[in-house]
Image: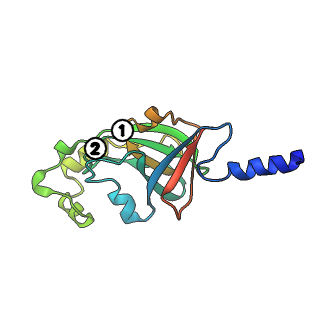
Amino acid sequence: MSMTKWLGLIIFFATLPGITFAQRSVPINIEQAATVEEKTWGLMQRKELPENHGMLFIYQRPQKLSFWMFNCLIDLSLAFLDEDSVITEIRQLKAYPEKMDPKRQVLSLKDLKKYPFFDPILIFFYKNQVSSSKKAQYALEMRSGWFREKGVKVGDRLVWERSSPHAYFISQ
């Protein structure tokens, strides 16, 4: 077999999900949050995340992104990704479930109205939000410490398709 045919086969197999050559692949399952409602609710009220499971927030264009932990029960790690799905930074998100008012539980999007704009609880979460230092088009929330534990770092790329809940990171 000629060198050109071998190279063609290697390139073909390297593009298949979960198969990489000279790169480390880290598979994950993602929930995709693309609508305003999905992005607004995010991972609120989750008591845990399954192993290697996260939520990918999808935006139409690169922009400065901010995330807060209002109504969240678990600490998270957050990766901001550029338009090429490359991680530009990883941040930690602290949950403060004890700051929520138990008399005003938020169990649906309509319950958000229980907290008016100038509510001290809303202001606390706003002040403790995490923002990207650069423009990002995607953000991925995983359970706290996941990126460090799996060796996923700034510069790694997320490979995924909108039609699938399966994705993986490859080291660049």
Question: What residue is pinned by disc 1?
Answer: 144
Residue lying farthest right? 2
Residue toward you, 102 or 45:
45
Other residues around mark 2 within 10 Å, as few (<14) / some (14–19) / many (≥20): many
Separation of residues labelled 2 and 1 (CA atoms): 8 Å
| Residue drawn at 55 percent across, 36 percent down | 154
Q: Position of residue 116 (x, y in %)?
A: 21, 58
Other residues around mark 1 within 10 Å, as few (<14) / some (14–19) / many (≥20): some
Inspect the image, locate mark 2, and give the three-letter code of the amino acid beneath it: Ile
In the picture, measured across the screen, residue 47 lies left or right of residue 11, that is left
Q: Position of residue 9 (x, y in %)?
A: 77, 51
**Pointers 2 and 1 in contact (C-beta within 8 Å):** yes
In the picture, measured across the screen, residue 127 lies left or right of residue 58, that is left
Secondary structure type for disc 2 = loop
Question: What residue is pinned by disc 2?
Answer: 74
Sequence order check, earlier mark of 2 and 1: 2
Residue toward you, 92 or 117:
92
Residue lying farthest left? 103
Inspect the image, locate mark 1, and give the three-letter code of the amino acid beneath it: Ser
Query: Which numbered circle lies on residue 163?
Result: none
Secondary structure type for disc 1 = loop
Q: Position of residue 27 (x, y in %)?
A: 51, 46
| Residue drawn at 68 percent across, 41 percent down | 21
Residue toward you, 9 or 62:
9
Q: Position of residue 23 (x, y in %)?
A: 64, 38
The part of the image, by quadrant, that contains residue 87 is top right
Quadrant location, the C terminus: top right
What colour scheme governs how the chains and residues are painted in the rendered image of this protein? Answer: rainbow
